[in-house]
Image (cartoon, rainbow, N blue to C red):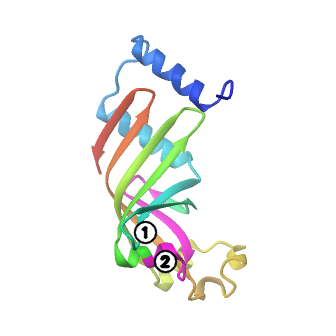
Amino acid sequence: MKPGGAIERGMESAKKIAAGEKPPWSKEEGFNKSQELAERSEIAMVGSIGNDGYPNIKAMFKIEAEGLKTIWFSTNTSSKRVSQFRENPKACVYFFDSDRFAGLLLVGDIEIMLDPDSKNRFWHEGWEVYYSLGPTDPDYCLLKFSAKWGNYYHGLQNISFEI
């Protein structure tokens, strides 16, 4: 165990809650803390269901978020992930803050977006390194995640909520 690492920080937070130094959160507080975590996170773990029925997880750049309800990602249309979402749109997104030992799980569905308006809206200069033809590249698409429910964890506190 690394001194001052994530495990120690998590234990310290849990000790404060167990000792009554931190009161339990309301659902509203848990939801607000969830939004703060999602807003400050640049990378999310995105889960899909593989063709063999087992979960697959991949780190992806969060392109934009509309609260907790809708989160946008970009990827290659030819990717394994897109193939999996075409077969089964069920997905999860996980944000983690190792400094605070906090995590947010969102569960919902992913829609593959190929329309020019969406592709142009989210296009960033420099992405030609991934999509050489620019926003019209047929191998460039967006993943639109729509959350149904979430669970926020910090210390010993766990708050689930509908979105």
Instruction: Give yes or no for residue 14 being in the magenta stretch.
Output: no
Q: Is residue 41 left or right of residue 125?
A: left
Q: Is tag 2's residue or tag 1's residue first in the polypeptide sequence?
A: 2
Q: Residue at x 52, y 66 (%)?
A: 73
Q: Residues within 10 Å of mark 1 (few under 14, many from 20)?
A: some
Task: Classify 96 as above or below 86.
Answer: above
Indicate the quadrant containing the N terminus: top left, top right, bottom left or bottom right: top right
Q: Residue at x 47, y 16 (%)?
A: 15
Residue 104 drawn at (x, y percent): 43, 44
Instruction: Specify the amino acid type for callout 2.
Output: Ser
Q: Residue at x 60, y 74 (%)?
A: 123
For residue 118, the mark is: 2
C-beta proximity under 8 Å, tags 2 and 1: yes
Disc 1 marks which residue? 144
Instruction: Specify the amino acid type for callout 1.
Output: Lys
Task: Classify 38 as above or below 81.
Answer: above
Instruction: State which region is magenta.
Output: 65-83
Q: Residues within 10 Å of mark 2 (few under 14, many from 20)?
A: some
Question: Mark 2 to mark 1: distance in Å?
Answer: 10 Å
Residue 134 drawn at (x, y percent): 65, 84
Task: Classify 14 as above or below 124.
Answer: above
The one of 30 and 87 positioned closer to us in this rendering: 87
The one of 126 and 18 positioned closer to us in this rendering: 18
Instruction: Give yes or no for residue 80 being in the magenta stretch.
Output: yes
